[in-house]
Amino acid sequence: MAGAGGIRLSNVSKAFVARGKTIEALRDVSLTCEPGSFTALLGPSGCGKSTILRLALGLEHADGGRVEIGGQTSEKATASGLTGVAFQDSALLPWRNVEDNISLPLDILKRDRREYSAKIAELIQLVGLKGFEKSLPGELSGGMRQRVAIARSLVTEPGVLFLDEPFGALDQILRRQMNIELQRIWTETRCTALLVTHGIDEAVFLADRVAVMRSRPGRVASMIEIPFSRPRSPDLFSDPVFHKLCDGIAEVLHGG
Amino acid sequence: MRMTINRRRFMTLAAAGAALPAVSRFAYAADPLAMQAAWINDAEFTGYFTAFDNDYYKDEGLDLSYLSGGPDVIPESSIIAGKADLTLTTPDTTIKAIVEQGAKFKIIGTQYQKNPHGIISLASKPISNPKQLEGKTLAVPPVNVISVEVMLKINDVDRDKVNIVPYAYDPTPLIKGEIDASLDFTTNVPYTIKQAGGVDAHSFLLYDYGYTIFQDTVVVTEETLATRRKELVSWLRASRKGWDENLKDPNAYPPKFAETWFKGTGRTIDNEIFFNNAQKPLIENPGGVFAMSEDGIAKTLDALGQAGIKGTRDMFDTTLLQEV
Amino acid sequence: MAAEQVLPAPKPLNQAPWFAPVRNIVILLVLWEVAGRFHLVADGALPSLTAIVERFWADRADYPAHVWSTLVSSALGFAIGNIVAVAAGILFVLSPLAARLFRGFNVTIFAVPTIAIAPILALTMTGISPRVTLAAMGCYFVTMTATVVGLTQIDLRSADLVRAYGGGKWDVMRFVQLRSALPIILAGLQVAAPNAVLGAILAEFGGGGRWGLGIYLLGSLGRADPPRLWSIGLVATAIAGIAYFIFGLISARVTGASKAVTMTTSLPPAGARTGGQWPSLAVAFGSIAVPLVLWWAFIKLLGVPEMIGKTPWGVIEYLFFLPLSQQAQTRLLDAMGQTLPITIVGTFAGLAAAFALSVSSRLVPNFTRALMPVALFSQTMPLIATIPLFVLLLGRGWLVTLIITISVTFFPAFITLAQGMKMTPRAALDLPKAYGAGAWTELKLVGIPAALPYLFAAARLTVPRALLGVMIAEWLATGKGLGNLLNQSRGYLDYGMIWTVAAASVVLSVALYQIVVLVERRVLANMGMRGSE
């Protein structure tokens, strides 16, 4: 593993021009994720939570402020293989089979795929796709494709993991299972994780802290510490304290 | 394609020739010379094919390259561009280019004494003179419109009363009656019409109605004339010999070229034999093939003059033929 | 974890998929035979199939040398043209500045009507180089455009993923763009293949020489022998058709494996068109200058004598500063006045035909599949061979021009549109289906709007070809306009006018093309879509 690095956004702002109109996606956002921590970004659609993630990955450039990953610029961090990412949409390449899609980050980072063959097999096992190694994405269901994307995000053994609503397209049961799996994987790797989601229970179950965002302009409205100890068991989902916490966050989210 | 002398080779040869005339004469057993024909291989050029196959050019010490022509090939362009040393042209375009664009051409001979271009119609609906074209539809290849316009003018026919449409090299519209007449070689198309349509053709030559010009005039640049006179004379001599031999019996040579010059042209040997017979009276001249009499030159100049193309006698050079 | 069920693609329930198209083709062939046998079309100018086959058999010894010559020229041109085209397409996608600088050049190469350039190539080049050049030019734009479309119409999230791992432009190109562009590039090659054959034959026809189907065609034209002309045309079609279907097969295989699973919804990055620190005006000027400089360089490098090879300045001088300029201007403007209106009408007509056909290809695939051979045939049958038939059927008025124009325009437009409709993501098409929509509703709601960028691409393909079609009709049937002026000028040895007409037809073509581009940008921007240009 590349060693967990922190994520630091200082006074970041970003605006977009679309069809002649300027939209202020982020205004003066500061956010610090300590190495090895798990942070969830929660907020309504269009509050800029995905933009934060795109800035951190160097896919967009901030109009103002600074973005650092593990003390480096986003570009350096991503190019060194420090980061891993899974998007809301699986974004699989339709012509690559499951194995080859999982290996894509290795190809981009010019790493030798053969050294990772055990890792790839392990990840396929982990996400429950054994027997589908040679299948093309067009032959998989939406949930299966998303699990490929998760496996792909972990293949480089990243120190910083970005997850952009990775389970958004999955059903509730599957989502729970994936949350539990993700927690297990994260506990093993102890990488710094930043999860963008609009599922409150998902955020509370997985994260150390939940940053609640508001839109127009996008900003962090409040930061909520999650007190549950780790490892967290699936029973937590039915714990009254868990529900109380979720309700509280929902209130903040809805402008309470 | 038999042989294409490309520009670079030509330039190299020209440069070598200029720098080391003595060496180059020794270096080449035969002198390379390129001729640009006006059309694809057909009986129009049998005289040259005869001279080739009977080694007349070789005997004259010439290494002749023969370039076939086509609709986009402007023969004069080939000699300007140095692709060929001599070419066969229609004198109207050549003289127009000399007069209007200052092109440095000289006409050193003519293959046809009488221009074979004529107005061809069906025998069932014959058109026998220019006047009868009025109110009719006449197909003319765009490149030859100039000739027809001159002929109409000479005969006081109102150009606007003749519906001139493009001729797409195919006699079918004439056979089917879509057009009333077409302009083409009278030495060739009547045969085709008989063959394909089973009907007889009727024709008259433009030449017989005042358009008294040569055809397939042998044209060179003044520069070639100055530097390669000896080869040109040799070419004229060998070509004349070829034509004489061929025209002795016009039925004799075309079949001999069936597997060589005429192979795969899409035309038939019978057609070429007809062509060869029909062109005989248009080529032969008491002064020998290619001869340009003062009378012939004057007639050509006169006809072109009526079209506003003011050529002069000095555009023709008959001295090479005298050497022959 | 519950294994999810993978649904197989639904299969049509009727007979074998090849049955209907084959049946339709057989019906078509029988109709043709009957029409030819009983002289039903144009008093027998359309020969029967058996007559064509008999003729072909009788002439069989003539073909090998001609076919070989045409194959060599067109294959050489196809290879050169497409290699340059793909390389250029990649360059243009990687470097927006290069794309903008070479825009004028690209449009020019594309817009040059082949019949205007063929005589110029015959004037300035030697040997088989005019044939190879014309074949290559027939491929360049189609493949270059297809490459650019393919490389830009990618799933933006896949590109994001590559960039998220620090991948640069070249990595995105390597891992995402090249492969995802492959179906569209192959579709481009599919259209380019007949173009190459046709280009080579056209150059053969005009350029002199001894072998090639074009030469054979020219020699045969004078014989008034329709079965011969049609058998030459069919041989040309067979060559092009084989190339077309080879690329079609490869394309089907590749597309089948890589059909996009979801639809990209991302807007293109704002301000992508402003590209770099270069002022727009300078780039626009450069874009106009590039083709002119290349034209000038072409003349100078080949060492074409001044009298026959006119530089851009030579044309300007001819049109404005010579004693006869006034007269030249009048002739040119008269000709353009005749050519322009019918070109515009022809563009719309050709596009409408292509659109109707591509919609029908979704609604009644079998009908379209049966039509395909006819469509392909109309592209590869050298027009010169069929013009007498067209003239006999339609006369020499505007109708013949219009029909010839439609016949040369609709095929590339159709291919582009059909490809666009085929590339519509599955999820988007599934949505209307989920609400019980029939094929037509599905097309109206998703298929056609999603294909809109392709409709504009098709329009851009159509405009210059329409001009070409009009000029061919003018040259061989009506005797009007630019097509006629060009050929008369050759008879007058009027080199200035030859180059002027070629330049004027390109300028006309580029202007019409530019109008389409402006409309396209406006419409697609309003719809939040991205053009392929």
Image (cartoon, grey):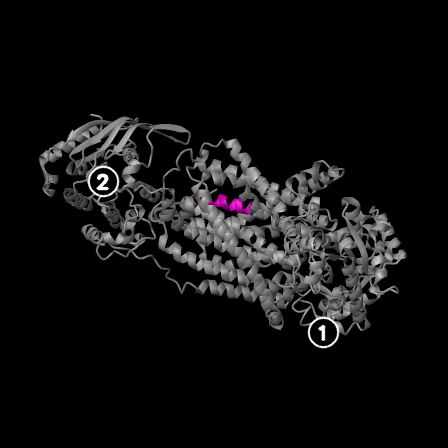
Q: Nearer the viewer, mark 2 or mark 1?
A: 1
Examine the residues drawn in magenta and state their main secondary structure: helix
What is the x, y in percent for residue C73? 57, 59
Q: Position of residue A170 (x, y in %)?
A: 23, 45
> In the rendered image of this protein, does residue B78 appear above or below residue C226?
above
Q: Residues within 10 Å of mark 1 (few under 14, many from 20)?
A: some
Q: Nearer the viewer, residue C527 or B237?
A: B237
Inter-mark Cα distance, 2 to 1: 86 Å
Determine if the magenta segment contains residue B108: no
* Residue B34, percent from left and from top: 71, 59
Q: Residue at x 52, y 48 (%)?
A: C141
> Mark on residue A204?
none
Report the residue at 77% width, 45% height from top. Answer: B102
Query: Chain letter of disc 1?
Result: B
Q: Amino acid at mark 2?
A: Leu
Q: Nearer the viewer, residue C371 or C458?
A: C458
Q: Residue at x 82, y 72 (%)?
A: B248
The kind of secondary structure element at disc 1 is helix
Q: Nearer the viewer, residue A161 or C91?
A: C91
Badges 2 and 1, same chain: no
Local packing at callout 2 (Cα closer than 10 Å; few below 14, some 14-19, many 20+) is: many
Mark 2 — residue? A161
- Dividing the picture into quadrants, the one containing residue C238 is bottom right
The amino acid sitting under disc 1 is: Lys
- Circle 1 is placed at which residue position? B256
Q: Give how far across and how far down residue C153 sits, in percent.
A: 41, 44
Is C290 positioned to the left or the right of A123 in the image? right
A134 left or right, relative to C457: left
Q: Chain of mark 2?
A: A
User: Where are the magenta residues, as a range?
Assistant: C451-463
Quadrant of the rendered image containing residue C56: bottom right
Q: Are marks 2 and 1 in contact (CB under 8 Å)?
A: no
